[in-house]
Image (cartoon, coloured by chain):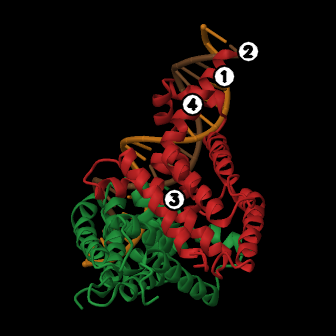
Chain colours: A red, B green, C brown, D orange
DNA sequence: GTCTATACCAAGATAGAC
DNA sequence: GTCTATCTTGGTATAGAC
């Protein structure tokens, strides 16, 4: 490794930045707090990342990568119920394992997506088009009820991401304790069942 | 009216503040921008609202009132399908008519609800408990599939609020144009059908 | 190549004018 | 009672030291 100090410091800064951006949003986050969590003097951050916006973009890149990874689980190969169930489960797992990423994404959209408009216009749009076609195909085959594919996708995104973005509210309504693994897994199963039961056409085979 | 100047200025400030807080979040919003939109010199705002936080709290109060208004449509009187459908429709209408309020609420939860923790702990918690009991009753009566009531409520909140909170993403995926009234009403109908079809027990009567 | 003292600016709040 | 010139703070970024 050519410069292990740089690599190590960049890593700890990115880790700290992801946490702070998730908790405070872009404007609420301060370089001082990120530096403190990274264990570095605040002025030092600007040596590794020229501006706050650049650091934010680097964090966002990691978030979008994780999103794409989960998005890849939506496959046309298997039957609709299995494909949808797998995708919903993957999105629930992502919300559970990387809640900070989901919150940063939500915050970015709320602000009008100044930094990820390109991602929305290209990658996301193509993904929605391709998966929308798959849903249309399933509908045409009589496996799903007729529905605008985007309505289904939005419901899946909204519901799964809610467990990350509104975790604070969920915790409050859970008596102040974060959802246990057991409760979360129950929710995951019920979300999968509720959505699939809602869209699957009740066929002759039941 | 004892002081119409005060009343008029407070109103325009609150209106401007709601828009700016929704677009930029608490930290991103500036008194200068709020003042500009309200058509007042910036320093003047502090005469009507001592601090930025106080102005924010006043805006939040209006947002929570609108939420409560929609929440009141969840009634135990009618049958489950009708009650759920009515509530989901009311939440969709709220998201359409007051998207800024939904965004401010989302942003506040993302930040850990520093200003509305009391609302979550008291009003919201009681509401969830009472409506959860209704859902439990419907399940016991065999009208709904067995499900944790909160899972259902979270799905309704997440999906309906998504149309306000992620409107920018939805617009992008709609080719750059905001959803038309027609498209939105179609989505509303499909969301109602999808969720009710997902939770209603397929009874002998069909 | 790595780090820090310092500059500069924007934003919220106040003291005091009208 | 209404409004504004001014202060202060805290935050990003830089110029320059080690």
The answer to which of marks 2 and 3 sits earlier in the sequence is 2
The answer to which of marks 1 and 2 sits earlier in the sequence is 2
Query: In which chain is the residue bearing label 2?
Result: A
Query: In which chain is the residue bearing label 1?
Result: A
> SS class of the residue under badge 2?
loop
Disc 2 marks which residue?
A1
> Does B56 sit left or right of A197 as displayed?
left
Question: Are discs 3 and 1 both within one chain?
Answer: yes
Q: CA distance from mark 3 to mark 1?
A: 34 Å
Q: CA distance from mark 1 to mark 4?
A: 10 Å
Residue A13 numbered mark, or none: 4
Question: Are discs 2 and 4 both within one chain?
Answer: yes
Frontmost residue, B22 versus B145: B145
Q: Judge the density around disc 3: few (<14), some (14-19), many (≥20) Cα neighbours within 10 Å.
A: many
Frontmost residue, B206 versus B177: B206
Whether pointer 1 and pointer 2 mark residues with C-beta atoms closer than 8 Å, the reply is yes
Disc 3 marks which residue?
A160
Name the front one of labels 2 and 4. 2
Disc 1 marks which residue?
A7
> Does B193 sit left or right of B168 as displayed?
left
The answer to which of marks 1 and 4 sits earlier in the sequence is 1
Quarter of image, res A18: top right
Q: CA distance from mark 1 to mark 2?
A: 9 Å
Q: CA distance from mark 2 to mark 4?
A: 19 Å
> SS class of the residue under badge 1?
helix
């Amino acid at each position: 490794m050519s410069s292990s100090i740089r690599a190590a410091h960049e890593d700890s800064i990115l880790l700290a930045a992801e946490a702070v951006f998730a908790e405070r949003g872009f404007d609420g986050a301060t370089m001082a707090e990120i530096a403190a969590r990274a264990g570095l003097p605040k002025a030092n951050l600007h040596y590794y990342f020229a501006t706050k916006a650049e650091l934010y973009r680097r964090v966002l890149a990691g978030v979008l990568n994780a999103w794409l990874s989960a998005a890849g689980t939506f496959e046309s190969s298997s039957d609709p119920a299995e494909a949808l169930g797998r995708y919903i489960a993957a999105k629930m797992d992502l919300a559970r394992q990387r809640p900070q990423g989901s919150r940063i994404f939500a915050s970015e959209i709320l602000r009008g997506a100044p930094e990820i408009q390109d991602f929305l216009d290209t990658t996301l749009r193509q993904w929605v088009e391709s998966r929308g076609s798959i849903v249309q195909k399933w509908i045409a085959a009589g496996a799903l009820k007729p529905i605008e594919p985007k309505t289904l996708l939005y419901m899946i995104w909204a519901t799964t991401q809610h467990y990350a973005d509104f975790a604070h509210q969920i915790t409050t309504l859970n008596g102040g304790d974060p959802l246990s693994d057991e409760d979360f897994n129950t929710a995951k199963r019920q979300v999968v069942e509720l959505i699939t039961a809602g869209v699957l056409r009740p066929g002759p085979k039941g």
